[in-house]
Amino acid sequence: MKAIKPRRAITGMSAILLPHLDPTTVDWPALDAHIARTHEAGLTPAVNMDTGYVQLLDADTRTQVLDRASALTGGNFVAGAFVDDEPGAAFDLDAYRAAADEITDRSGLPVIFPSHGLNEHGDDAWLDAHGRLADHLDRFIGFELGPMFVPYGRIVSLEHYRGLLALPPCIGAKHSSLDRSQEWDRLALRDEVRPDFLVLTGNDLAIDMVMYGSDYLLGLSTFAPDKFAERDRLWAAGDPGFHEINDVLQFLGHFTFRPPVPAYRHSAAVFLHLRGWASAPAVPAGAPRRPDSDLPVLRHIAERLGVR
């Protein structure tokens, strides 16, 4: 087990939910406000990620999201470089380069979002693809995403992760296996070979991984970027109040990221609506939903966090 690293400044990136008025209409004012409040809280907004329904968006909508994130943050954002392909597809370098360039042209930092072509051909091919991207990009973030989130997810071997750390343009990687042991192994390897590399936890079931040296790029933080920022400040100050906030946020994570995991986005939409941050608790067509019986539990958690 990794040793705890007290009083560490935490780098927080928060995946931004894309609010909807109904299954076909984006709530653009709510999106703008959510990007702005996340940025103002001191977290880096991450748009066009799984939390932002990137797989369900058309190209024009993805571009509009990038434009708004760039304008609202002055370019201090990260975004999923997404390639829409089919099972069995080959890795499409040109499509990934174009998706990444669309982000960097707006001063954002690309996150190499998983696809069939990137992930279906084995760990060697996965690493080779990132090496080819490193020849084109000055800076990017990698992304291991488990199949509980998307059917084309891949968590690579530790040796292939070592290969990712050997690519200087790759400044960090989001790790979403929901497995502490695998993340601890990555932290140990990072500390050994490249201490400046960001291990960005995507483990919404173990958000205390920041105590061991992980930073984060989480979907859970979209529910309460203000409380995550407060929690992070308390950790840096050595204040035990960190644990009180973290415990309630973790309760929220275990409740909303239960199977089927992708339905957490509906939970987030309901929670933002409860907080007055979205006009409706809607999700786009094709996104899974939670039962109405979740609402009183979410109200209780909001009260525990002091945001109701």
Image (cartoon, helix red, strand yellow):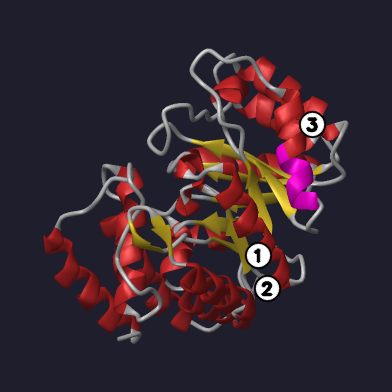
Confirm or deny contact between disc 1 and disc 2 (CB under 8 A). Answer: yes
Quarter of the image with the C terminus in it: bottom left
Please identify the quarter of the rendering in which residue 117 is found.
top right
Q: Are marks 1 and 3 in contact (CB under 8 Å)?
A: no
166 sits to left or right of 304: right
Q: Amino acid at mark 3?
A: Leu
Rendered location of residue 256, percent (x, y): 29, 57
Q: Earlier in the sequence, mark 1 or mark 3?
A: 1
Is 158 placed left or right of 192 in the picture? left
Residue 112 position, x and y percent, is 66, 39
Residue 64: x and y in percent read 62, 57
Give the distance between the C-alpha atoms of the residues marked 2 and 3, in whole angstroms: 28 Å
The kind of residue tagged 2 is: Leu
Q: Which residue is mark 3?
A: 133
Callout 3: few (<14), some (14-19), or many (20+) C-alpha neighbours within 10 Å? many
Q: Nearer the viewer, residue 8 or 117?
A: 117
Give, as a single range, the part of the protein colored magenta.
99-104
- Amino acid at pointer 1: Ala
Please report whichever mark, 2 or 3, sits nearer to the chain's N-terminal start.
2
From the image, tell me which residue sits under label 1: 69
Q: Where, by quadrant of the figure, is residue 260 drawn?
A: top left
Q: Quadrant of residue 140?
A: top right
Q: Does the magenta run of residues contain 24?
A: no
Question: Does residue 171 appear in this view?
Answer: no
Residue under label 2, please give it. Answer: 72
